[in-house]
Image: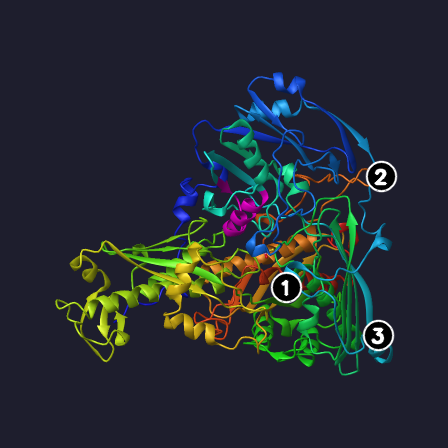
Amino acid sequence: MSAPLLVGQGVDRVDGRLKVTGGAKYAAEFNIENLAYGVTVQSTITKGHISKIDTTIAKKSPGVIDILTYRNAMQLHFPASSDPGQGKFAEKDLLPLQSDRIFYDGQHIAVVIAETFEQAEHAASLLQITYDKQDAIFDLKENIGKSYKPAKGLGGSEVQLKRGDAEKALQTAAVKIDETYTTPVYHHNAMEPHATIAQWNGDELMIYDATQSVAGSHSLMSQLIGVPKEKIRVVSYYIGGGFGSKGFSWPGTVMAVMSAKLVNRPVKLVLSRQQVFTTGGRRSQTIQNVALGADASGKISAIKHASTVETSFVDEFVEPAGVATAMLYASENLDVSHNLVRLNKGTPCPMRAPGEATGTFGLEVAMDELAYKLKMDPVKLRLVNYTETEPQKDKPFSSKNLKECYEKGAQAIGWGERSYEPRTMKDGKYLVGYGMATATYPANRGKSSAKAILFSDGHAEIECATQDIGTGTYTVMTQLAADTLNLPIDKVKVKLGDSKFPQGANSGGSQVTASVGPAIRAAAIGAIQKVAKLVVNDKNSPLYKMDPENLVLKDGLLVSNGNGKKGESLFDILKRNNLSQIEGQASVNVSTRGQQQEANPAAGSAEEAVQKESANNEAIKSDEAVDRKSYAFHSFGAHFVKVRVDPELGKVYIDKIVGVMDIGKVMNLKLAKNQIMGGQIFGIGMALMEGTEYDPVRGRVVTRDLANYLVPVHADMPDFEVIFLDKPDLLISPIGARGIGEIGITGITAAIVNAVYHATGIRVRDLPIRPDKLI
Ligand code: MOS
């Protein structure tokens, strides 16, 4: 009997013990000799110039080593790239500490470096700064007239999408919905704030960073400071959450590098919770106008989704709220547009399902409204408009089983017992309601490389410059590598989060499992193939003179396929040949974004050897040969929610959330459930609690801590039921997984809002649903 496969099981996190015992080191936790502490000072005006920074008093404060300002900071170079995978600086037109200009409240303007954190923090309060203030604009609604249409979104994605003539079709539609849905600014609030330790060693630079892209941070730092990549190493072994906030690089990282240069000592720079609220990114506020037109049977003929969102004066980021609207339902006519307003605030950035999280609120509440206008069941309306092809690209989906998600979800929540009319169900004094919505997220896959090393002592190591942002990448990749190598889980060590390893995908767009998994699998297969070649030339091996192509792993032994009696372990051959290790390298160049596969890096780079070896790896050849341009790659799901509402207090209690997800192969049942629940909890926050408030006079964030920015806590948790269809998608990759980090937050907010409508008859279109909106 072969050992059961680890992939698919709810294997415990391989780094779980390290994390709960403090053994897992996060960016700020490295004990480095002679470490100095940097504390940043942030602007207290919203727009203008610094007229004077007087450092005299601060410099005399105990422990202060030096103070970094625009007057003594090293000159930075504008980076060339804006591809997040290659490193994206969040504020492309505002490199930190390069001038006296202020574009937003909370902009970094100085770093005080001292012997201790407390000394630096105290001295930071002693800086005397005078400003030359200018009038600022910071309110999206007030400045909607200043909006413009951005040409493209992140990474060159399309954000203005049309088919047919939506305007005309709307005019003739029998039934129409035309409403405005608004969402406030949200902040990621990862447990770990942005943190960096920078250490110069001669002309070499070591950076301990909290980043969702060690490869991106590495490349970006090289560009910003003009030091070759070979001289820089970025590590990020453990990350306390990112949710998109650590996908771009923020000023703190390069300011730590500049500070370390200035004082010629390693410097640690950790942002405070309050500082993260102005310079760590946020989800843009959205104002979404959604119009739907349908015939009496519910068939939709027109969809319009016009979103107005915000960006800063120093970069352009579009929260692409309408992108899912273009692909989710069949409609011959569609007009998805995005308008941007520049504000004197920091730059917004991706936050868990950027676009889909906010946009599916607008679209899926509008769908519920349309269903009620048609006197139709909301699930049925979605079935009437179901599409097997991606309507905007006119391509079949690689795999779509959404109907089954609706069926299983309806069953699990008890949708059949729901009375149709709102405000008709009760439980004692509470109003009871059921709501549902569709979830969807693109199935992204990009180029990744990896290395697999077999050691003669019987263990294997995997190396890849991707990272685990807390989602469980270490664990899933260990499962996959162990299965591929026929090894028990404790004989495989996966090493991530180090720029010196072969470049893996950045942890964004739910792409790591689908991108890095196949590279790790191929690297492991490459290593096995090398052993197979050795073994057939070894007179002392039972496999001598066999065809290496026919050798397979079975029960931990390399055996001849079809004649599995004789075999030996991968490691015995290494020992006999006095080899301490053998390694396989793989680079798999696949894209599901309908783009060209990426060009190979310049000759002579470290990647070149990997490319060369990859050319002979059959696993890579067959993976890269799949025709992916003819398909659209998406995951789907359905959320069903049961709520109780106290009609006197307006308080919403969520009793149960069912999520049924079609995300391809489930790699780890426990971690996958955790990801979906995590997304749903984000959705509870969006629906009922979260929202960043700004001072309307000065444009400053006022809810800048976790006491004032409300997030759901344990006491708010419902009964969760997460169900996976677990149908491998073999078009996306040989491992069949489509990624899972973001889909859980899509649709969930709408499902809650729709349930609240069903309970109360009150349709809330402006989030969050705080009690005042229900009484
Ligand atoms: Mo994710 S918001 O793409 O890090």
**Element assignment for label 3:** helix
Q: Which amino acid does label 2 sit on?
A: Asp
| Labels 3, 1: front one | 3
User: Quick check: 528 left or right of 415?
Assistant: left
User: Quick check: 53 left or right of 570?
Assistant: right
Q: What residue type is labelled 1?
A: Val
Residue 618 in view of the camera: yes
Snapshot colouring? rainbow
**Element assignment for label 2:** loop
User: Quick check: 342 left or right of 721?
Assistant: right
Residue with the mark numbered 3: 167
Asked whether the residues under the numbered discs 3 and 2 touch, taking CB atoms below 8 Å apart as contact, a structural biologist would say no
Q: Whole-percent x and y of residue 250?
A: 61, 44
Ligand 1, what quadrant?
Answer: bottom right
Q: Which residue is drawn at 66% across and 62% down?
A: 156
Q: How many labels does the image show?
A: 3
Q: What residue type is labelled 3?
A: Glu
Q: Residue at x 23, y 69 (%)?
A: 558
| Magenta segment | 207-224
Tell which of 350 and 94 is nearer to you. 94
Image-quadrant location for residue 256: top right
Alpha carbons under labels 1 and 2: distance apart: 46 Å
Alpha carbons under labels 3 and 2: distance apart: 38 Å
Among all residues in the image, which is located at the extreme front?
603
Residue with the mark numbered 2: 135
Tell which of 750 and 581 is nearer to you. 581
User: Mark 3, residues whose alpha carbon is within 10 Å: few (<14), some, or many (≥20)?
Assistant: some
Mark 2 or mark 1, which is nearer the start of the sequence? 2
Residue with the mark numbered 1: 641
